[in-house]
Image: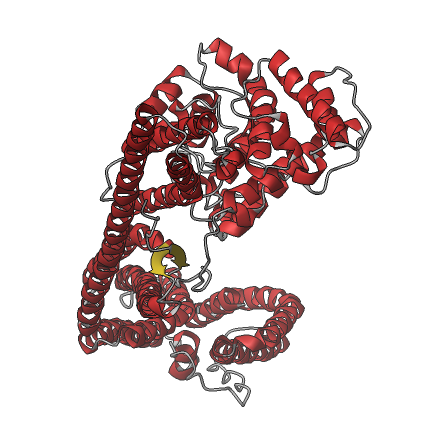
Amino acid sequence: MSSLAATTFRWKKCRLDLPGQVSLQACKRSPDEHNDVQKKTFTKWINARFSKSGKPPISDMFSDLKDGRKLLDLLEGLTGTSLPKERGSTRVHALNNVNRVLQVLHQNNVELVNIGGTDIVDGNHKLTLGLLWSIILHWQVKDVMKDVMSDLQQTNSEKILLSWVRQTTRPYSQVNVLNFTTSWTDGLAFNAVLHRHKPDLFSWERVVKMSPIERLEHAFSKAHTYLGIEKLLDPEDVAVQLPDKKSIIMYLTSLFEVLPQQVTIDAIREVETLPRKYKKECDEEDINTQSTALAEEGQNPRAETPSTVTEVDMDLDSYQLALEEVLTWLLSAEDTFQEQDDISDDVEEVKEQFATHETFMMELTAHQSSVGSVLQAGNQLMTQGTLSDEEEFEIQEQMTLLNARWEALRVESMGRQSRLHDVLMGLQKKQLQQLSGWLTLTEERIQKMESIPLGDDLPSLQKLLEEHKSLQNDLEAEQVKVNSLTHMVVIVDENSGESATAVLEDQLQKLGERWTAVCRWTEERWNRLQEISILWQELLEEQCLLEAWLTEKEEALNKVQTGNFKDQRELSVSVRRLAILKEDMEMKRQTLDQLSEIGQDVGQLLNNPKASKKMNSDSEELTQRWDSLVQRLEDSSNQVTQAVAKLGMSQISQKDLLETVHVREQGMTKKSKQELPPPPPPKKRQIHVNTEAKKKFDAVSAELLNWILKSKSAIQNTEVKEYKKLQETSGMKKKLKGLEKEQTERTPRLDELKQTGQTLLDQMGKGETLRGFFLLEFLEGYA
């Protein structure tokens, strides 16, 4: 018989170093990994049951269950009946206790295959796990789901559970549960089940940004705190290439027990239409799953080759019994090998196929000694010379058949292993090549985008934003492919060592750096384009508003009468209109300055000479319209002054009138350092007036005029200074409040002046009357 000389492979898992993800790491895949996980999970489950009944916990499951007493304690809690136990410490007492356990399980219709009392007493790890899984499957899985299964007339508990999970997680686009293994490694599915029924417990967006280990810890902690579910699973046992199916089913049934159990027949039909590689997990009945020698899911139960095979007695009956058991196992192994799917062309499916076949190859290795023992026993029988010719011929035929079938299975299995390896490495290499090619094209695309100046106008900039959004969409689409590279698998033989992965890890690191650079550039450019777009849009809108405002003021100035006044009322209206225009323009001057500053900011961000030139031109055009309006306002003021002279108001100098309506540009106001002298005495006429009242009127009016001019000068100087230095706004407010106080204090003086002026108007002639009326109107308007 040829030995199983296949190259021993081991996994090496590499991660693509991307933003927010852990660095490159490697892990070995232990042959007993699933057994260890099941041991931990089953131990936690048992201790959770014991804690409810007040019994002490177990520490080492395999040794603590050997005498059968802890198993009887467990069944007492599950069945609700008291079970007698033998307290002796001999092997006989232990066997009696374990046999009583098997009897109770049989009475509760828990089907067991190939598990005997001696297997548990001897501490057989695989069969002990198988026994416990049968118990868990009956009381934890099927018992919890029996009502739903009855209502839907279904007998497959796994199909019901998978349907419930898929129906629960359907609203979450990042979650697509296809099985009880690989669909749970990233932790999203566990959190989705909780969030769907308890959305107030946490933010889904925050969970998506976590690492797989963090997500798993988050889900298990929330379920324990708010739902009272024991932490049966450890995050590090789930966030692996192929987690343990039974452990995950155990935990999910705990969630199913406390959460709403709504399962529709449509959800079940959807599960039935899944691809075969996912569906067969649910289609396989677990009645014989206690044969945990095949710790991986999706494999049929096998008959264990008893340990006596290696100690075959040299008699025909013992040989025939051992041969029968080996052939039974070999038939099962051949069926399992034939049932394996054709090698897929999807990299994730091939990873799973390789993991499944790796377990199968380890099983072949484990049974190789049993096959060899049977062949050796046959040879010894034939050399003893105690057989008849017919018996010897039969044994020879049996040995030839056994060896041929074993050799054929071994060769075919090694061939499939090699093909899986080649296909997997080829697909992963193709993935890397595709990502490298995509990055090269994207980097060239970025260089081209950088070489093109930013938009000459706002529509051009909007077009660049649309093109950049297209790049972002391409990045998001590629992200899905990049995610599949975060868990690459490298298969190396024992001779090549860690050096076999060095090249790949270096390649992954470089790709990760290139991907990060592309993502960072895309984000930074998007933020810059957005900022420019907002500022430019604001600039254009404010320019339109200022243009409309200037048009309005130009039209208002056109309506101001500057000559051919019929009486002082028309002259008063013109003066007041000019004063209002002056005040409006002084207030609007700040807007013109702000537009100039925004234009400079946009120009610096754009770094586009053509666009900057256009913005400067628009700003200059607005400035010219502003200056033109200022000049026209000055001209209108001069014309009103001349009209006053024609009406005989010679005692008001043209300089004083111009000072009241003169438009000054922001920051160019001259400070009045001298008080205006009182108006010159009027021409002597033969009119009887109150001389004292006249002197008092002239003095008060001069005082008020001088205060008005000084106040306006102070306000204008304050605006120029304070708007440029925002940190001094408190001083500006203080000065304005001081002026308001002074205005309030002078209000009685203005009222007194109006009364005195009205008395004098009654005593004056036409010219003096017009002069006095104009002066009172002006003072009242500006005060």
Q: Residue 566 sits in which quadrant?
A: bottom left
User: Is 527 left or right of 133, judged from the image as shown?
Assistant: left
Task: List x then y, in percent, for residue 296.
Answer: 44, 38
- Choose between 690 and 44: the one closer to the eye: 44
Task: List x then y, in percent, for residue 469.
Answer: 26, 55
Q: Residue drawn at (33%, 63%), measured in percent from left and top?
A: 519
The quarter of the picture where the N terminus appears is: top left
User: Is 445 left or right of 174, judged from the image as shown?
Assistant: left
User: Is 291 left or right of 632, judged from the image as shown?
Assistant: right
Task: List x then y, in percent, for residue 446.
Answer: 22, 68
Q: Residue 121 sits in which quadrant?
A: top right
User: Is 494 left or right of 462, judged from the image as shown?
Assistant: right
- The answer to whether residue 37 shows anywhere in this view is yes
- Choose between 591 and 92: the one closer to the eye: 92
Q: Is residue 249 above or below residue 112?
A: below
- Choose between 149 and 119: the one closer to the eye: 119
Q: How is the image coloured?
A: secondary structure
Q: Is residue 551 above or below residue 258?
A: below
Q: Residue drawn at (49%, 85%), measured in percent from left and top?
A: 680
Q: Is residue 232 above or below residue 323?
A: below
Tally the marks.
Answer: 0
Q: Residue drawn at (61%, 42%), measured in percent from left and top?
A: 40
- The answer to whether residue 542 shows anywhere in this view is no
